Image: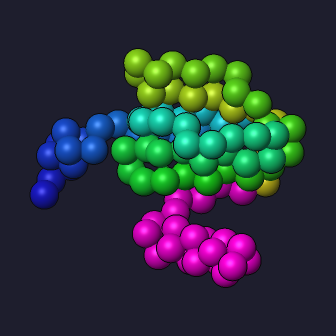
Amino acid sequence: MDKVEEIVMYGNHEVKLIDRREISLSGIKKITSFDAEEFLLESNMGIILIKGTNLEIMKLDTHDGHVKIKGKINSFSYLDNKDKNKEESLLSKLFK
C-alpha cells in the first residue's frame, strides 16, 4: 500500500506539541473521556492517551476533527489493543 492509499484509508492525522503547554491534534473522531489530568481520544490512527495537569480544551472542531488542549502535558501515547486489554484487565482485577 502506498502513502496515498494510506491517507485515503485513514485520513490525515497530525500532532503538534508546543513547550509541553499546548497540544493540537487533527484526525480526532471523538473524545472518549477527559478531566483535568487525562484525555482519552479516538483518532483515525488509534486511541490516544494524554496525561498532565490542569488540562482543558481550548478548541474543539467536531466537523474537521481538530482538538487543541492546554495545560502541562506529562505524557502522550497511542494505545494499541494489547495496552487497552491490559488496562481493562487491571481495572477488572481491582474491582472484583
Q: Which residue appears farthest toward the front when viewing the image?
A: 96
Left or right, 59 with reference to 13 = right
Q: Position of residue 69 (x, y in %)?
A: 69, 32
Q: Quadrant of the C terminus?
A: bottom right
- The colour scheme applied to this rendered structure is rainbow
Q: Quadrant of the N terminus?
A: bottom left
Q: Nearer the viewer, residue 37 or 2?
A: 37
| Residue 61 position (above or below residue 14) | above
Res. 83 visible in picture:
no
**Residue 41 magenta:** no
Left or right, 41 with reference to 71 = left
Which residue is painted at 52% across and 68% down in the image? 84
Which residue is painted at 57% across and 70% down in the image? 88
Q: Position of residue 70 (x, y in %)?
A: 76, 32
Magenta residues span 75-96
Q: In the rendered image, which quarter is residue 71 located in?
A: top right
Left or right, 96 with reference to 2 = right
- Determine the main secondary structure of the stretch shown in magenta: helix
Q: Which residue appears farthest toward the right when viewing the image?
A: 54
| Count of number-bearing discs | 0
Which residue is painted at 86% across and 45% down in the image? 53
Q: In the rendered image, which quarter is residue 11 located in?
A: top left
Q: Nearer the viewer, residue 89 or 17?
A: 89
Q: Nearer the viewer, residue 48 or 6?
A: 48
Q: Position of residue 50 (x, y in %)?
A: 67, 50
Res. 1 visible in picture:
yes
Q: Position of residue 40 (x, y in %)?
A: 60, 48
Left or right, 2 with reference to 20 = left
